[in-house]
Amino acid sequence: MKLFGYFRSSAAYRVRIALNLKGIKYEHVGVNLIKAEQRSEANLARNAQGLVPTLQTPKGQFITQSTAILEWLEEVYPANALYPEDAMQRAEVRALANTIACDVHPLNNLRVLNYLTQNLNVDNDAKMTWYQHWIDLGFTSIEKSLGQNGFSFGDDVTMADVYLIPQVYNALRFKQPMAKFDKIMAVYDKCNEIQAFKDAAPDVQPDA
């Protein structure tokens, strides 16, 4: 397998975590978003949106969108499952993950932030206000939903953690105030004690 991504991409970070948790070997191929390599002919050939990540399967097929990649991995590699067996509990985990994937991350990714500054002439202070507003809104709801066991749901790693940890990493990088998110930070600290999360961290990737 090959994972085409960028070391600081939250979406690529999610996929790295899941691959590591499932013990799946893969080759990391860097696509530099700062240098606009995502819009290169080579990347557009495998990802029509010109985004990352893209997973190339052992059969040479390409899967785009991190959510689609993660669901495919769960279906094709069911060992070390990232969803509970109970259908209602799976729905709860998906709800937590989708709070990140649908309501927080899309408003704060690089192309949106760049559009604010480059196309709408938003200054850096206003951009950071925008960023922190959506993080605060999403994290406030997540904080209320977390249990007391140190993980996002239940007493083991789930897909909710796979989504949450990269978003917390980004929040910390952008100086998000986190004092009122004790449960989220407990999850972040506990997950980052696990080797699969350590090996997926942005700062240890080949293109960092």
Image (tube, grey):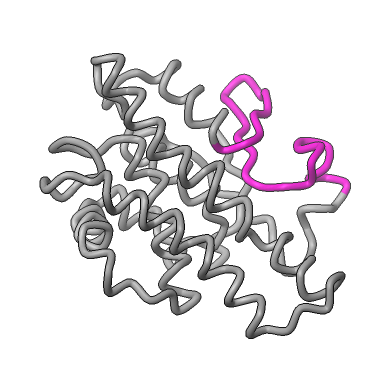
Q: Is residue 123 magenta?
A: no
72 sits left or right of 35 in the view:
left
Residue 52 lies in the magenta stretch: yes
- Residue 22 quadrant: top left
- Looking at the image, residue 192 sits to the left or right of residue 54; the answer is left
Who's the residue at 67% across and 84% down the image? 124
Pick whichever, 127 or 10, lies toward us.
127
Vertical position of residue 187 compared to residue 22: above or below: below
| Residue shown at 87% from the left, 70% from the top | 119
Which residue is depicted at the point 62% across and 19% down? 59
- In percent of width and height, residue 140 lies at 36, 57
Q: Is residue 14 visible?
A: yes
Image vertical order of residue 100 relative to residue 166, above or below = above
Q: Quadrant of the N terminus?
A: top right
Q: Position of residue 58 (x, y in %)?
A: 57, 24
**Chain part drawn in magenta:** 41-66
The answer to whether residue 193 is visible is no
Depicted 25 relative to depicted 106: above or below: above
Residue 31 % position (x, y): 68, 56
User: Which residue sits at x=44%, y=54%?
Assistant: 138
Q: Nearer the viewer, residue 164 or 104?
A: 104
Tell me residue 27's x, y (percent).
Answer: 53, 44
Number of labels in the image equals: 0
